[in-house]
Image: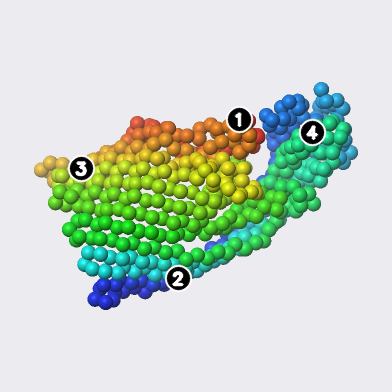
């Protein structure tokens, strides 16, 4: 639901064009998410526990925690070659865990209210100089909650509640280093406690990254503003310089993993300061127009959306920057023929120090971004086209013919460029190489202009390109494919 009220008019002999207004909106979200695990998941978990998790633990050989799985019990495996008889890992009666049948029914809600008052004014300082000033005060409130309606995850409960005893047995009985023992036990918890099918608020969730219910409020307010000084000679030439301060509200990650281990499911508001200088001009007796703009943007608490293999997560990066220039040209040298051309250079990047002072759940991801280009932000892009829109011949039929060529430079397609853990290997398919795409349109209009028949084609050369590259669900740990 939204409402907007505006008052606008002119004053001082039309020297002032003014506007004031207010805006209110209310949005309610209610989502029920139900997921259950089947036998194929447990087969996957057993294979992951068969060998030590991750390349860095490969020297450990077979994973002793494989004995905890139902697969080990049904195949009669009571000892691991090279390791020996596996001790009781603090699970009831040494019974192997089985995540098959684990499920959760989770309810997520959000009630958001937004209120703002704003003004936008154009002041004619002289016949050639104008000053545009505007401001908006925004007040945002969001109440977000996660409540679990029903759940059963005995495999997770057994593994998580016996976490410390498992580590103790791995170190004291098998003699594994403490770091290796903790990593192996953590891997077992991660596999048996798939966040979307895990019971919330287990006793172990106080110290382990397991789902917790939450009922929290996000609140923020901001004064945004814009100012532009422009010179117009009223003969086809305009020059301007502008600055604006923008705001995009924060909110909640509404999923059970967002609150795991006591993480805060909220993400902060994004703020941007933008600077631009440019010209717009008419050339050749108004047969052509040419526009040029140079810009720079400083973004704080930049919001990034990532699919990490099991969930979509929005998190903040302390800073991002974008600097560039755009040039546009449009020419009509024949009454029925139009030529258009535009090119843009954009350096949209994360600063080298974008992770300074950060910690927490998103830190591992953020540190891989520093010094990288933003996703789907090629440094060079452009388009050129030619259009004929006029009579076909003396019959009175009309012809519309258009062809355009689009170019995109090399660009990143994933959120993260490398693995989030050592040895930080580059992720495959992250970069899309530069390419051209050709589009065309052909149309005929009847002499009375009552009917038009058109055919068109997009990407006529069948150039296959990637838009987004993301992790595959449950692909394994870093370095695994």
Question: In this rendering, would 65 be left or right of 227?
Answer: right
| Whether residue 444 is visible | no
- Considering the numbered disc 2 on the image, is that residue within a helix, a strand or a loop? strand
Outermost residue on the top side: it is 81
Label pair 3/4, CB-CB below 8 angstroms: no
Q: Quadrant of the C terminus?
A: top right
Q: CA distance from mark 2 to mark 3?
A: 46 Å
Q: Please, what secondary structure does the residue beneath circle 4 have?
A: loop
What residue did someone put label 4 on? 177
Of marks 1 and 2, the one in the foreground: 2
The residue mark sitting in front, 1 or 3, is 1
Q: Residues within 10 Å of mark 2 (few under 14, many from 20)?
A: some
- Counting residues from the N terminus, which is met first, the one under dot 3 or under dot 4? 4
Residue where numbered disc 3 is placed = 388
Most extreme residue toward the bottom is: 12
Q: Residues within 10 Å of mark 4 (few under 14, many from 20)?
A: few
> CB of mark 1 within 8 Å of CB of mark 2?
no
Q: Earlier in the sequence, mark 2 or mark 3?
A: 2
The residue depicted at 24 percent of the width and 57 percent of the height is 238
Q: Which residue is mark 1?
A: 481
Q: CA distance from mark 4 to mark 1?
A: 27 Å
Q: Nearer the viewer, mark 4 or mark 1?
A: 4
- Mark 4 and 1 residues: CB-CB less than 8 Å, in contact? no
> CA gap, disc 2 to disc 4?
61 Å
Mark 1 / mark 2, whichever is N-terminal: 2
Residue 229 image point, x, y percent: 31, 62
Label 1, label 3: how many angstroms apart (C-alpha)?
Answer: 51 Å
User: Residue 117 — which label?
Assistant: 2
Numbered marks: total: 4
Residue 223 placement, left or right of 340: right
């Amino acid at each position: 639901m939204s409402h907007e009220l505006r008052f606008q008019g002119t004053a001082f002999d039309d020297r002032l064009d003014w506007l004031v207004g207010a805006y209110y909106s209310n949005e309610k979200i209610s989502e029920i998410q139900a997921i259950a695990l089947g036998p194929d998941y447990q087969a996957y978990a057993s294979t992951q526990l068969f060998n030590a998790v991750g390349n860095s633990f490969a020297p450990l050989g077979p994973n002793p925690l494989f004995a905890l799985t139902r697969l080990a019990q049904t195949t009669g495996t009571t000892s691991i070659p090279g390791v020996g008889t596996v001790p009781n890992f603090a699970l009831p009666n040494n019974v192997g865990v089985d995540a098959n049948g684990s499920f959760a029914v989770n309810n997520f809600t959000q009630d958001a209210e937004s209120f703002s008052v704003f003004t936008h004014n154009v002041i004619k300082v002289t016949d050639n100089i104008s000053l545009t000033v505007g401001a908006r005060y925004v007040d945002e409130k969001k109440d977000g909650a996660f409540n679990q309606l029903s759940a059963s995850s005995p495999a997770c409960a057994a593994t998580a509640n016996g976490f410390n005893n498992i580590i103790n047995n791995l170190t004291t009985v098998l003699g594994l280093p403490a770091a290796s023992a903790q990593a192996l036990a953590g891997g077992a918890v991660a596999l048996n406690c798939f966040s979307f099918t895990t019971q919330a608020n287990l006793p172990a969730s106080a110290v382990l990254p397991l789902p917790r219910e939450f009922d929290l409020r996000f609140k923020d307010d901001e004064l945004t503003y814009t100012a532009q000084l422009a010179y117009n000679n009223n003969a086809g030439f305009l020059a301007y310089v502008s600055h604006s301060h923008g705001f995009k509200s924060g909110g909640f990650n509404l999923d059970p993993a967002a609150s795991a281990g006591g993480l805060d499911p909220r993400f902060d508001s994004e703020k941007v300061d933008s600077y631009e200088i440019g010209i717009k001009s008419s050339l050749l007796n108004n047969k052509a127009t040419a526009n040029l703009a140079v810009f720079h943007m400083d973004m704080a608490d930049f919001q990034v959306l990532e699919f990490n293999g099991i969930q979509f997560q929005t998190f903040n990066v302390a800073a991002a920057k974008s600097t560039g220039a755009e040039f546009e040209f449009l020419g009509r040298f024949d009454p029925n023929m139009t030529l258009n051309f535009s090119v843009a250079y954009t350096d949209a990047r994360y600063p080298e120090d974008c992770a300074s002072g950060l910690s927490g759940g998103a830190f591992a991801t953020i540190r891989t971004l520093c010094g990288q280009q933003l996703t789907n932000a090629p440094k060079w892009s452009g388009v050129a086209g030619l259009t004929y829109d006029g009579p076909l011949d003396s019959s009175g039929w009309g012809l519309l013919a258009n062809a355009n060529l689009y170019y995109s430079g090399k660009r990143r397609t994933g959120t993260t460029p490398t693995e989030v853990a050592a040895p930080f290997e580059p992720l495959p398919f992250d970069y899309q190489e530069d390419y051209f795409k050709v589009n065309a349109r052909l149309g005929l209009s009847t002499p009375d202009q009552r009917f038009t028949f058109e055919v068109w084609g997009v990407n006529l050369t069948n150039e296959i390109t990637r838009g987004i590259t993301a992790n595959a669900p449950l692909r394994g740990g870093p370095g695994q494919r």
